[in-house]
Amino acid sequence: MTFVVTESCIRCKHTDCVDVCPTDAFREGPNFLVIDPDECIDCTLCVPECPVEAIFAEEDVPPDQHAFTALNAELAKVWKPIIEMKPALPDADEWAQVKNKLDQLKR
């Protein structure tokens, strides 16, 4: 099992989770983070750190977010690791509660 970053992270990209990850499992894209399933050790430290509640255990990913499990694995292979906390995107607060924003994901 691994943890998965879901749609709530798109256009927010808070990095509080990165700061607590003991294995540097997070990967950074232009407006989204993913977790590398090969690096994640299921420690759960990142879950309470996410201010938009975007991180779930793979078995707990909401049904409408299941595609994000494969998306995390796919993008983790091409995006670079992020190992330090950075500021969230400038308009993160505006996007935090927006639903159905997969079309906003930049690869």
Image (cartoon, grey):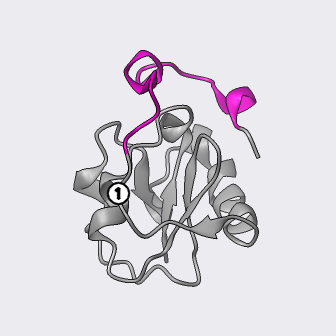
Q: Amino acid at mark 1?
A: Met
Residue 64, given in percent of the width and then of the height, sits at 60, 38
Residue 42, given in percent of the width and then of the height, sits at 38, 78
23 is higher (above) or lower (below) than 76? below
Q: Residue at (34%, 42%) from the top-left corner?
A: 53
Foreground pick, 63 / 47: 47
Q: Residue at (43%, 70%) from the top-left corner?
A: 83
**Residue 106 found in image quarter:** top right
**Magenta part mainly helix, strand or loop?**
loop
Residue at the disc numbered 1:
85
Q: Give the magenta-colored segment's residue range.
A: 87-105
Residue 60, given in percent of the width and then of the height, sits at 43, 56
55 is higher (above) or lower (below) than 103? below
Foreground pick, 48 / 61: 48
Does residue 49 appear left or right of residue 86 in this picture? left
Residue 102 part of the magenta-drawn span? yes
**Residue 87 found in image quarter:** top left
Q: Secondary structure at mark 1?
A: loop
Q: Residue at (28%, 39%) from the top-left corner?
A: 51
Does residue 45 appear left or right of residue 97 in this picture? left
